[in-house]
Amino acid sequence: MSSSRVVAGPLSAGSILRPQLDGADFVHACQATTRRDGRPALQAYRDMAATIPGWFDGLMALRNRGMQLLGMKHLGSLRAVQGTVDPVSGQRLGIFTLQSLDDDVIVLEDNDRHLRVQLALQWQGDVLEVATVVHTHNAFGRLYMLPVAPVHRLIVPRLLEKQVRSYR
């Protein structure tokens, strides 16, 4: 894998989310070789969140307004992770709740009555993998994922590419 290329594909053999694949309704992973420079997984997540484009913030704001009208929770903003110091398991980091954290991997989740989303940023040497696994719980969750899945496949590789470019 070249240092400037993001590769989308299956979760790596060493992905922390691999045990979650059984029955998953959506799985997406991309990897890139980049200079780690001692960056822990939390910093990689913060770096990605900081590069969210304006159009995505607009989509999230629209999503939050629409979901609130349907009685669903307001997720907030991905960028909200920036102000969090020394997060602990169970704490909100942007739109997700922190499940686990060490220097090599951060696992985040959002779980409600319609779906469970797990996101992991994981260092494997100088390869950074961003992996997502979604389990839908009902028809609304499956309907919700119809527009979310293609947007996710579009934005995550681009955010990872920005990481790679910024650490060359």
Image: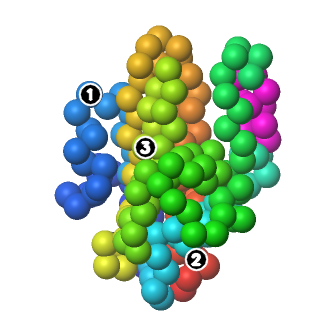
User: Picture coordinates of residue 60 (x, y %)?
Assistant: 72, 39
How far, Cα to Cα, is label 1 from label 2?
35 Å
Name the amino acid, label 1.
Gly
Give the residue pinned by disc 3. 118
Query: Bounds of the magenta span?
Result: 58-67
How far, Cα to Cα, is label 3 from label 2?
26 Å
Tell me which corner region of the image, top left, top right, bottom left or bottom right, holds residue 137.
top left
Give the residue pinned by disc 2. 165
* Residue 33 in sight from this viewpoint: no
Crowd rating for badge 1 (residues with CA inside 10 Å; few <14, some 14–19, many 20+): few
Q: Main secondary structure of the magenta part?
A: helix
Above or below: residue 137 compared with residue 161: above
Residue 61 in magenta stretch? yes
In the image, 79 versus 71, the foreground residue is 71
- Helix, strand or loop at label 1? It is loop
Residue located 58% across and 39% down the image: 151
Tell me, for residue 69, which label it has, or none.
none
Name the amino acid, label 3.
Gln
Give the residue pinned by disc 1. 23
**Which is more N-terminal, label 2 or label 3?**
3
Residue located 50% across and 49% down the image: 90
Residue 53 in magenta stretch? no
Query: In the image, 137: left or right of 57?
Result: left
Crowd rating for badge 3 (residues with CA inside 10 Å; few <14, some 14–19, many 20+): many
- Helix, strand or loop at label 3? It is strand
User: Picture coordinates of residue 134 (x, y %)?
Assistant: 41, 34
Residue located 72% across and 65% down the image: 83
